[in-house]
């Protein structure tokens, strides 16, 4: 393998890996506070992409209740990305209120919340199909305005072409990841979130309204997941209502590889799986998923707590 | 021995006929107590007498089956824990519950959560008011940390501190809430005699400086007898005696409850 191809693959891997990280962080945030995997996250990923698509003025197809619907205006992509995924975040807040909080209030086992969130995912997928059909939607070519379709990081003789969408994936993910890290490590609310993640009861006794923080966590989770969905949708296409489900499985692989509940773990896990996938040779590309999960198995055999997870010893 | 507390006529905390059962076990059985403003009030009794459960009821972690609680004249019986904390009740735990992964400073700053006003938006945007408040919070937290001599370890993980420091840090974190009532659950557990004496002095200082009322659960009798203005004794969920230390010590029911454990007689 020559150096340019290697560089190309690393860049590809980093681009998709950073989106994996962004998406997986949504699982991580909720898990670290509620100790439960929120299976509706994959559906919110899908929703974020649809919301943004609609807000950029994209038209819907011939099927479903909203056949041929289209907003009378089209927002520029960056604005639609933020607004569309604020909507995704609000949806996630609604999911917390409907599917998580009532169970929590009754002291139900976390496993029930997991099943309930799976139910929400199914409902959302079906709702999307009912509203806009199962068609594939592609963001219009002019989504990124005047930006060229690809940037050459090599020389004229040894070109290292990187698609603009991949660069945008990487840059947007990086900006969001840095902002989230600063928020969690530097602000009062971020510190409170970490406190709740460690010991919810004590946090409540110190005057922290944990229900409000859980709601915020769901918003952040939905916002991150939606951005990930939008970036993938804009880079390839929105493949239909099941768009997020395959991605959902990969997100689980990422958080388990990185270490459940660990924020740096989700980032490292995402980048590792992204890079592993990008090194799958072209003729075996159909087995990409298998490679990612094989990688997960091997890593877990060596480190069962995940790459950055801590072996937790709890009082019994 | 104790500085004269400023007692007022109306109790700061009162419980009336508070009862709570876990399944068939009655942990707290018709307990009525009034704690006067400014006093250091001891809560003693054999293991399993219901002392910690009473603390959990007072702080809203457990809703009692029966009975009512009042703090500063207002009912708190069914308020969630964070509301009760906001009203001004702070506490520590029998088994230390610091946020081990957070730094010493962050632990204390978390205690100030309800006393600050910046919200998600102003915090994220780094608005000047939010930043000024953050600075002030940090400064106040550092002053408290300075009191327990941990200034140079303010940025280490709280979980890495030695045991005695963790105990003191937990008290200071509760103080950050600016409570008017502080509930201490076995603060001297695991300390040696010298540390216990230092802790006792610290508690008294803190009471005087912040004009606090303190309720303390403690098994170490010399500490309780020397520190408390009044003592309540619980056994099998019931209140069996209440009064000044000397009177409680002579109470036959109390001696009966402690029979077999020499702790109480050994002063």
Image (cartoon, rainbow, N blue to C red):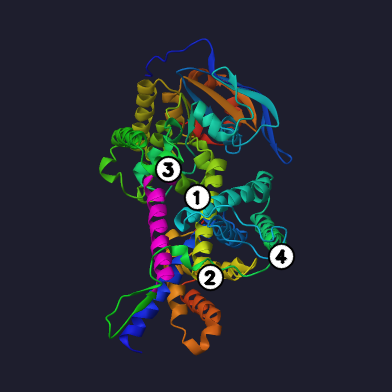
Q: Secondary structure at mark 1?
A: helix
Tags 2 and 1 both on a single chain: yes
In the rendering, at what x and y percent does residue B43 appear?
53, 28
Q: Chain of mark 2?
A: A
Is A247 colored magenta in this rendering?
Answer: no
Q: Which residue is mark 4?
A: A63
Q: Answer yes or no: do the residues labelled 4 and 3 have beta carbons within 8 Å?
A: no
Farthest residue toward the top?
B9
Instruction: Name the front one of labels 3 and 1.
Output: 1
Q: Secondary structure at mark 2?
A: helix
Q: State the mark number for residue A253.
A: 2
Q: Spatial distance from mark 4 to mark 1, Cα to Cα? A: 44 Å
Q: Answer yes or no: do the residues labelled 2 and 3 have beta carbons within 8 Å?
A: no
In the rendering, at what x and y percent does residue A234 appear?
50, 66
Q: Spatial distance from mark 4 to mark 3, Cα to Cα? A: 71 Å
Farthest residue toward the front?
A72
Farthest residue toward the left?
B152
Q: Is residue B130 left or right of residue A245?
A: left
Instruction: Name the front one of labels 4 and 2.
Output: 4
Instruction: Name the front one of labels 4 and 3.
Output: 4
The residue lying toward the viewer, choosing from A19 and A197, is A19
**For marks 4 and 2 on the same chain, the one whose residue lies earlier in the sequence:** 4
Q: Is residue B44 left or right of residue B128?
A: right
Q: Spatial distance from mark 4 to mark 2, Cα to Cα? A: 34 Å
In the rendering, at what x and y percent does residue A253 appear?
53, 70
- Which residue is pictured at 41% across the width and 61% down the height? A172
């Amino acid at each position: 393998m020559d150096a340019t191809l290697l560089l190309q693959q690393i860049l590809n891997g980093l681009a998709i890996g950073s989106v994996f990280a962004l998406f997986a962080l949504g699982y991580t945030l909720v898990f670290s506070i509620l100790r439960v995997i929120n299976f509706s996250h994959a559906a919110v990923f899908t929703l974020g992409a649809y919301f943004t698509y609609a807000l950029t003025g994209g038209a819907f197809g011939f099927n479903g209740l909203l056949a041929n619907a289209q907003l009378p205006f089209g927002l520029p992509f960056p604005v639609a990305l933020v607004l569309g995924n604020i909507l995704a975040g609000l949806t996630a807040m609604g999911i917390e209120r409907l599917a998580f909080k009532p169970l929590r209030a009754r002291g139900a086992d976390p496993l029930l919340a997991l099943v309930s969130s799976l139910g929400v995912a199914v409902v959302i997928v079906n709702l999307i199909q009912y509203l806009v059909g199962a068609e594939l939607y592609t963001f219009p070519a002019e989504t990124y305005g005047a930006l060229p379709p690809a940037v050459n990081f090599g020389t004229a003789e040894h070109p290292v072409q990187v698609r603009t969408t991949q660069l945008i994936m990487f840059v947007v993910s990086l900006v969001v990841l840095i902002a989230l890290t600063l928020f969690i490590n530097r602000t009062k609310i971020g510190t409170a979130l970490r406190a709740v993640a460690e010991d919810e009861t004590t946090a409540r006794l110190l005057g922290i309204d944990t229900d409000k923080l859980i709601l915020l966590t769901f918003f952040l989770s939905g916002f991150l997941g939606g951005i990930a969905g939008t970036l993938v949708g804009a880079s390839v296409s929105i493949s239909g209502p099941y768009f997020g489900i395959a991605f959902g499985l990969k997100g689980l692989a990422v958080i388990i590889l990185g270490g459940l509940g660990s924020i740096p773990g989700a980032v490292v896990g995402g980048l590792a799986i992204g890079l592993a996938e990008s090194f799958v040779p072209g003729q075996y590309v159909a087995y990409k998923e298998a490679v990612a999960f094989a990688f997960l198995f091997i890593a877990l055999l060596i480190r069962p707590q995940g790459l950055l997870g801590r072996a937790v010893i709890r009082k019994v | 021995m104790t500085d004269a507390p400023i007692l007022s006529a109306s109790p700061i905390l009162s419980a009336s006929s508070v009862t709570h059962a876990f399944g068939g076990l009655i942990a707290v059985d018709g307990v009525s107590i009034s704690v006067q403003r400014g006093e250091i009030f001891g809560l003693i009794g054999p293991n399993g007498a219901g002392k910690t459960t009473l603390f959990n009821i007072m702080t809203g972690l457990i809703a009692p089956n029966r009975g009512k609680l009042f703090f500063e004249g207002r009912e708190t019986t069914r308020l969630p824990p964070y509301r009760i904390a906001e009203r001004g009740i702070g506490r520590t735990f029998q088994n230390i519950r610091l946020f081990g992964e957070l730094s010493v400073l962050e632990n204390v700053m978390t205690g100030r959560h309800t006393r600050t006003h910046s919200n998600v938006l102003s915090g994220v945007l780094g608005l000047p008011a939010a930043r000024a408040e953050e600075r002030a919070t940090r400064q106040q937290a550092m002053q408290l940390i300075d009191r327990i001599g941990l200034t140079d370890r303010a940025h280490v993980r709280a979980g890495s501190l030695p045991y005695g420091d963790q105990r003191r840090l937990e008290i200071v974190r509760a103080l950050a809430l600016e409570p008017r009532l502080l509930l201490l659950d076995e603060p001297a557990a695991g300390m040696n005699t010298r540390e216990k004496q230092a802790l006792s002095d610290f508690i008294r200082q803190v009471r005087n400086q912040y004009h606090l009322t303190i309720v303390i659960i403690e098994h170490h009798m010399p500490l309780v007898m020397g520190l408390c203005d009044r003592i309540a004794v619980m056994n099998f969920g019931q209140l069996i005696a209440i009064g000044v230390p000397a009177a409680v010590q002579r109470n036959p029911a109390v001696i009966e409850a402690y029979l077999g454990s020499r702790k109480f007689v050994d002063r």
